[in-house]
């Protein structure tokens, strides 16, 4: 279960390759999303939207890990 960091966020979406695969309204500034991940090498992104459908935040669950994996492979 995720917890939003700011007041005013209303909708959370899980997106895979730019396609929304789950969406929910925030209740008490919390959200729960269930979605596939690492499907055909596409990784999950979480996006939060405000009351006027403006995107307020976006984050990959694996931000930074891809860089670490590439560095580890280069060191081998």
Image: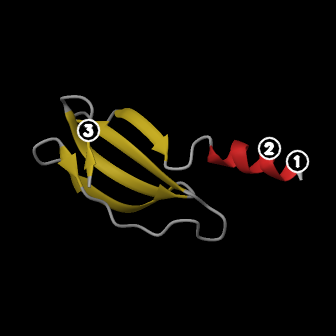
Q: Residue at x 27, y 32 (%)?
A: 5
Q: Nearer the viewer, residue 3 or 58?
A: 3
Give neighbour class at mark 2: few <14, some 14-19, many 20+ (Cα, 10 Å). few
Q: Which residue is mark 3?
A: 4
Instruction: In the rendered view, tell whether residue 62 sits above or below residue 5.
Output: below
User: Which SS class for mark 2?
Assistant: helix
Question: Measured from the top left, where is residue 60 in percent x and y?
Answer: 51, 46
- Which quarter of the figure is the N terminus placed in? bottom left
| Disc 2/disc 1 C-alpha distance (Å) | 5 Å
Give neighbour class at mark 1: few <14, some 14-19, many 20+ (Cα, 10 Å). few
State yes or no: discs 3 and 1 in contact (Cβ < 8 Å).
Answer: no
Question: Earlier along the polypeptide chain: callout 3 or callout 1?
Answer: 3
User: Which SS class for mark 1?
Assistant: helix
Q: Which residue is mark 2?
A: 71
Q: Which residue is mark 1?
A: 74
Q: Choose mark 3 or mark 2, whichever is in front.
A: 2
Instruction: In the rendered view, tell whether residue 39 sits above or below residue 3.
Output: below
| Disc 3/disc 2 C-alpha distance (Å) | 31 Å
Q: Is residue 56 left or right of residue 66?
A: left
Marking on residue 66: none
Question: Measured from the top left, where is residue 31 in percent x and y?
Answer: 23, 52
Q: Residue at x 34, y 66 (%)?
A: 34
User: Which SS class for mark 3?
Assistant: loop
State yes or no: discs 2 and 1 in contact (Cβ < 8 Å).
Answer: yes
Q: Is residue 21 left or right of residue 41?
A: left
Q: Choose mark 3 or mark 1, whichever is in front.
A: 1
Instruction: In the rendered view, tell whether residue 52 sits above or below residue 15.
Output: above
Q: Nearer the viewer, residue 47 or 4?
A: 4
Give neighbour class at mark 3: few <14, some 14-19, many 20+ (Cα, 10 Å). some
């Amino acid at each position: 279960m995720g917890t939003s960091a700011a007041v005013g966020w209303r909708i959370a979406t899980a997106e895979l390759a730019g396609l929304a695969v789950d969406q929910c309204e925030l209740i008490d500034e919390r959200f729960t999303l269930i979605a596939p991940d690492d499907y055909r090498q596409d990784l999950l992104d979480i996006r939060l939207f405000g009351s006027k459908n403006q995107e307020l935040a976006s984050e990959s669950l694996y931000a930074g890990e891809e860089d670490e994996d590439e560095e580890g492979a280069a060191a081998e």
